[in-house]
Image (spheres, rainbow, N blue to C red):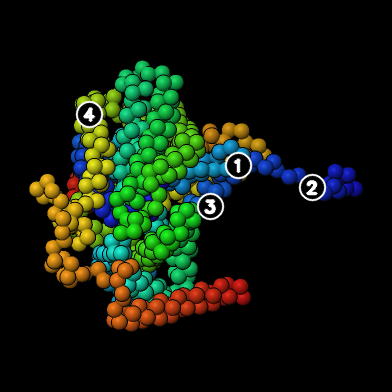
């Protein structure tokens, strides 16, 4: 015999106020983590050294930014698009997404200026084209460069060892602490059903625990380094 | 508040980066002196924390969310100099990996978010919370809230000024802006209203919520605790030079930017007649400059030579082909995704 209450269709709708910020934060974190972990950049067998590509990218960005010559902008744009067209569809769509966001933002920002004074149209279009080229350049660089190669470049450029060590550590901690934040946020969202009036407490809690865990991990790492013979010489690392 | 590429002129970017160099040097020195060797990697933790903090969506009224920069919070936890380095590294990674903020405008972004924000926020916190261990929790949290609110507003103001001076300094002969098209009268309200109304509130909530948690659970880890434990390293005197530097830089930066507008020896051929060397304007344009070799060929009123037309034609063909290949690849990927 089935009791009456079991036959009823469940029509519980959780209140709208369920903590959307957990999901948004999880979403943005997830995006970042996947980019850092999985898509660290694929270097072809014959690609130029990372340092050369970094310099080339910065040189082209400066050139595009400084020049008022439409032909130069067009030439760099053509070169950048050809390079982009040679990449795989996956990489292209990732770069194009970033570029679209930047270009749409630029159009929104420049539109009122053009409406106020239509004579500005060509100038504004030129700036938008420059933005498009610069963002594409950075996107291509990301997709084709491995991160450890970039720190090697910094070392060649005689950046102090301490700074390189800190940059390296930052990378690792973004992944480690990011994972921790994802776990914490998942735990909080699983435990808070319905209305949660203590949202700000959980903001402090999640980021606070992340900070505490970070300091703890830092201490453990230093001890592990010492166990392996580290003598406080960051320059020689 | 991340300024993308090409909204600021390269000259402005160069000035802002130059302004950051002494700040970075000071911060590295101070961090090396102040932090024990085993805490050097804490700057990396601070950078990662700042990076992740900018990802954190803080709940606002009516289900909306916003994200904080967290500059003042990092300064409260790690000290202002470590915060400056940490936020700078976070901004560098954002510019290089995620295209958030430009590469040329990196110096300007660091000036606003890694220098002005943590130092102003921390300075105001110090003023309100005082310099002793017995400060009441109320004063400390008020200091953190007001410090972070004012910090982000001042940083936004610096950002607005950088945008706002662009059209006055960098425009073509017809007066059209070459970079950001809005003057100070538009840039300042456009930046300040949202920051004072929303972003500042988010920043203050974020800072107080996390600082309160850390103070309650392990008060010995805050910068205040480290500073008071080791008075020689973090004395008030130690911060005086950087605040003086901040004041000088903030005052001098607009001047430097104004000066770059008419760099000596970089006048255009049409400007040279107005240059006064002996008090009276020159009054003429040297003939060599009128007839001389012009590096920048296709000006608006300059007829494109035959070569340039050919080059432009070839380039358009290249751009068109590349675009077609890109669109084709994207389409085929989308189709493959559907059938799979």
What's the distance in space between the residues labelled 1 and 3, CA to CA? 16 Å
Marks 3 and 2, the one that precedes in the sequence: 2
Q: Secondary structure at mark 2?
A: loop
- Residue at mark 4: B240
Q: Disc 3 designates what residue?
A: A27
Discs 1 and 3 lie in a common subunit:
no
User: On the image, which quarter does residue B288 sit in?
Assistant: bottom left
Residue B141 percent location from the top left of the image = 43, 25
Q: Which residue is found at the position 76% from the left and 44% from the top?
A: A12
As measured in the structure, the alpha-carbon distance from the residue carrying label 4 to the one carrying label 1 is 43 Å
* Badge 4: chain ID: B
Where residue A149 appears, x then y in whole percent?
29, 63
Image vertical order of residue B127 relative to residue B171, above or below: above
| SS label for mark 1 | helix
Quick check: marks 4 and 2 in contact, CB under 8 Å?
Answer: no
Q: Real-space Cα distance between discs 2 and 1? A: 26 Å
Residue B333: x %, y % from top left: 53, 74
Crowd around label 1: few <14 · some 14–19 · many ≥20 (10 Å):
few
Quarter occupied by residue A80: bottom left
Tag on residue B63?
A: 1
> Which residue corresponds to mark 2?
A10
Q: Is residue B231 above or below residue B283?
A: above
Residue B94 appears in view: no
């Amino acid at each position: 015999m089935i009791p009456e209450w079991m036959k009823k269709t469940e029509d519980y709708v959780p209140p709208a106020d369920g903590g959307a910020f957990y999901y948004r934060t999880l979403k943005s974190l997830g995006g970042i983590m996947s980019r850092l972990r999985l898509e660290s950049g694929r270097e072809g067998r014959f690609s130029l050294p990372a340092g050369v590509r970094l310099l080339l990218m910065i040189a082209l960005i400066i050139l595009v930014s400084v020049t008022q010559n439409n032909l130069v902008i067009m030439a760099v744009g053509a070169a950048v698009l050809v390079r982009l067209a040679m990449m795989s569809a996956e990489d292209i769509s990732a770069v194009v997404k970033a570029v679209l966001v930047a270009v749409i933002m630029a159009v929104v920002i420049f539109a009122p200026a053009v409406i106020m004074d239509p004579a500005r149209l060509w100038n504004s279009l030129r700036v938008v084209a420059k933005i498009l080229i610069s963002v594409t350049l950075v996107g291509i660089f990301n997709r084709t460069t491995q991160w450890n190669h970039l720190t090697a470049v910094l070392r060649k450029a005689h950046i102090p060892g301490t700074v390189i060590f800190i940059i390296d550590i930052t990378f690792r901690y973004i992944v480690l602490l990011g994972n921790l934040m994802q776990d914490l946020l998942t735990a909080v969202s699983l435990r808070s059903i319905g209305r949660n009036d203590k949202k700000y407490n959980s903001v402090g809690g999640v980021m606070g625990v992340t900070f505490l865990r970070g300091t703890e991990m830092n201490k453990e790492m230093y001890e592990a380094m010492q166990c392996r013979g580290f003598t406080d010489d960051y320059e020689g690392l | 508040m991340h300024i993308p590429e090409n909204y600021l002129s390269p000259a402005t970017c160069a000035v802002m980066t130059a302004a950051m160099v002494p700040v970075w040097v000071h911060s590295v020195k101070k961090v090396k002196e102040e932090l024990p060797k085993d805490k050097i990697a804490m700057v990396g933790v601070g950078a990662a924390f700042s990076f992740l903090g900018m990802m954190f969506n803080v709940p606002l009224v009516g289900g909306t969310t916003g994200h904080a920069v967290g500059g003042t919070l990092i300064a409260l936890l790690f000290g202002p100099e470590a915060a400056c380095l940490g936020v700078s590294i976070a901004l560098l990674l954002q510019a290089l990996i995620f295209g958030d903020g430009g590469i040329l405008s990196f110096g300007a972004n660091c000036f606003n978010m890694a220098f002005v924000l943590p130092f102003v926020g921390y300075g105001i916190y110090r003023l309100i919370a005082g310099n002793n261990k017995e400060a009441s929790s109320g004063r400390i949290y008020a200091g953190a809230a007001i410090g972070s609110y004012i910090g982000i507003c001042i940083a936004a103001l610096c950002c607005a000024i950088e945008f706002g001076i662009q059209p006055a300094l960098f425009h073509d002969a017809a007066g059209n802006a070459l970079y950001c098209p809005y003057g100070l009268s538009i840039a300042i309200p456009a930046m300040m209203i949202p920051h004072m109304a929303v972003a500042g509130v988010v920043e203050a909530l974020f800072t107080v919520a996390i600082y309160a948690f850390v103070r309650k659970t392990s008060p010995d880890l805050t910068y205040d605790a480290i500073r008071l434990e080791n008075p020689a390293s973090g004395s008030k005197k130690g911060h005086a030079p950087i605040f003086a530097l901040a004041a000088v830089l903030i005052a001098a930066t607009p001047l430097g930017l104004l000066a770059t507008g008419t760099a000596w020896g970089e006048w255009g051929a049409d400007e040279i007649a107005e240059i006064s060397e002996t008090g009276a304007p020159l009054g003429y344009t040297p003939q060599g400059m009128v007839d001389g070799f012009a590096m920048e060929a296709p000006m608006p009123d300059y007829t494109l030579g035959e070569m340039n037309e050919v080059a432009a034609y070839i380039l358009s063909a290249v751009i068109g082909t590349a675009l077609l290949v890109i669109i084709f690849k994207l389409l085929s990927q989308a189709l493959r995704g559907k059938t799979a």
